[in-house]
Amino acid sequence: MFVLGLTGSIGMGKTTTAQLFADAGVPVHDADVTVHRLYEGEAAPLIEAEFPGTTKDGKVDRVVLGKRVIGDPAALRRLETLVHPLVRDAEQEFLRRAEAAGARIAVLDIPLLYETGGDRRVDAVLVVSAPPSVQRARVLARGLTQERFEALLARQMPDAEKRRRADFVVDTSKGIDPARAQVQSILTTVARMPPKQK
């Protein structure tokens, strides 16, 4: 089974692109959705032990936790040390199930793919991109402040570097139909590529 890593900075259209793969019948694992689920389950007691007062009713309060770790690299690393192994376990289980179901291609949607070394666990990387003006307009339209946007960007590898390292790039600035056509083209190409991973 060929494993395609999907990534892109905030506001680039990654979620929409992941949905285009799902619409094409490709199993997609969303790391963010997994984190949300873990925050409401097995990760909550671990996070509460490390960051007291960040859970309520057995679930992580993401706003409180965010205030605790944003701008504190050491705290953020401690949080990632707790959460990343659980996300990795869920990812491996997803891949096992997809392969057992006969999938020939699977997608791992990982926002910080390069930043966390996830590119070493996939056969190829697809970066979702758009011009900076489009990205900024999308993010601010979501209600994020300029300050929060800049803080998130600071944690992410620059888009130009991601595109340089990527095997594939999907430009989402032209609308949904051109993006869908790019996804179909990538699926056609990937179907002829041998997996690198063992």
Image (cartoon, rainbow, N blue to C red):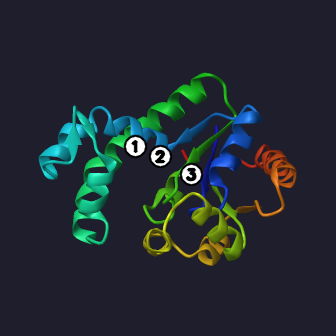
Label 3: how many Cα within 10 Å (few below 14, some 14–19, many 20+): some
Amino acid under label 2?
A: Asp
Where does the N terminus fall, quadrant-wise? Answer: top right
Residue 177 in view:
yes
Residue denoted by label 3: 122
C-alpha distance separating marks 2 and 3: 17 Å
Q: How far from the left and from the top, in percent, is residue 179? A: 81, 53
Q: Residue at x 83, y 46 (%)?
A: 184
Residue denoted by label 2: 32
Residue 77 in view:
no
Which dot marks residue 50?
none
Q: Earlier in the sequence, mark 1 or mark 3?
A: 1
Q: Nearer the viewer, residue 154 or 106?
A: 154
Residue denoted by label 1: 35
Residues tagged 2 and 3 counted as in contact (Cβ below 8 A): no
For label 1, the SS is helix
Instruction: Tell me if residue 2 comes above or below residue 76 in the rendering.
Output: above
Left of 97 or right of it: where is 49? Answer: left
Q: How far from the left and from the top, in percent, is residue 3? A: 61, 45
For label 3, the SS is loop
Q: Earlier in the sequence, mark 2 or mark 3?
A: 2
Amino acid under label 1?
A: Val
Q: How far from the left and from the top, in percent, is residue 140? A: 58, 65
